[in-house]
Amino acid sequence: MEIRFDNKVALVTGASSGIGRATAREFARAGAKVVVHYNVSKDDAEAVVDAISKEGGEALALQADVSKKKEVEVLVKDTLDRFGTIDFLINNAGALIKRETLENMEEALWDEVMDVNLKSIFLVSQAVIPIMKEKKFGKIINLTSIAARVGGGVGAGHYSASKGGILTLSKNMAKELAPHGIIVNAISPGIIDTRFHERFTTPQIFNKFRESVVLKRAGTAEEVAWPILFLCSEYAAYIVGETIEINGGQLMD
């Protein structure tokens, strides 16, 4: 089974590092033209574009704060100006910002995490949907987290709540958009070895998390990217409104 996306266009938000970077590179390897979105990490995003170009792919780095409607509109316009359409939207941008207990959390921190993680999916999807509806085709993949189901760790209530919102929003999007040829699903990563945990999780806690995984290891960004590509392929045409858990057996239904 070979997955190819020749002459297709993928917009990957938060693609300068981690899961987003791996997803952008895998899409390019499968033949897609890729928009590598970033907010502040310009050098990292351009490095992803360079890596794709060296492998014979085509990619474009575009900056936007995806929690702001006007910037999202420019992001989508610039994508269309370069590539003409958008076939796949991977809503990957997200952040924890910092850990803080609910009791001590400032309202501004709560709002920022909700904006980056949840509002961004609303805004970017809203901007892309008309493009997909016009051609009666599109795939949207929203990145949630195992934290949505287990509540996250101490100091991550804002993060886990935002990721829980993504779970339910994805199901609603799937119902609304399927009649228009747009398929929506979600991906829920567990413990993945990325900069996220380097920044927000101590080595001791990370090791404790890893030991709770049946496979006794953290996942790689590529192990999340591959199922994303599968969900965008013809082989997943009958999968709608689902959340694929990628957690090495840490959480089983």
Image (spheres, rainbow, N blue to C red):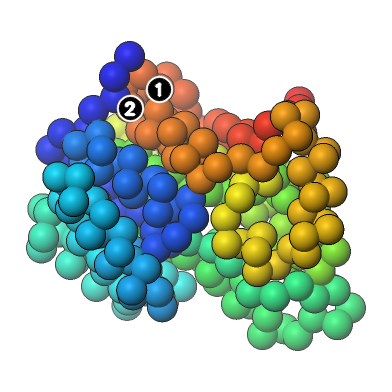
Residue found at the very far top of the displayed protein: 1
Image coords of residue 196 (percent x, y): 61, 62
Identify which amino acid the numbered label 1 is placed on. Ala
Image coords of residue 81 (percent x, y): 10, 63
> Which residue does the numbered mark 2 point to in the structure image?
233
Image coords of residue 33 (percent x, y): 19, 47
> Which residue does the numbered mark 1 point to in the structure image?
236
Look at the image and tell me in which quarter the N terminus lies: top left
Give neighbour class at mark 2: few <14, some 14-19, many 20+ (Cα, 10 Å).
some
Q: Is residue 161 visible?
A: no
Which label number is shown at residue 57?
none
The structure residue drawn at horizontal position 20% and vertical position 45%, both measured from the top left corner, is 55
Look at the image and tell me in which quarter the C terminus lies: top right
Q: Is residue 1 left or right of residue 155?
A: left
Image coords of residue 186 (percent x, y): 53, 40
Depth check, front residue: 49 or 161: 49
The answer to whether residue 74 is above or below residue 85 is below
Report how far apart the C-alphas of labels 1 and 2 lie in the structure. 6 Å
Tell whether label 2 touches label 1 (CB within 8 Å). yes
SS under mark 2: loop
Q: Is residue 253 left or right of residue 37?
A: right
The structure residue drawn at horizontal position 77% and vertical position 29%, both measured from the top left corner, is 214
Identify which amino acid the numbered label 2 is placed on. Ser
The answer to whether residue 102 is above or below residue 160 is below
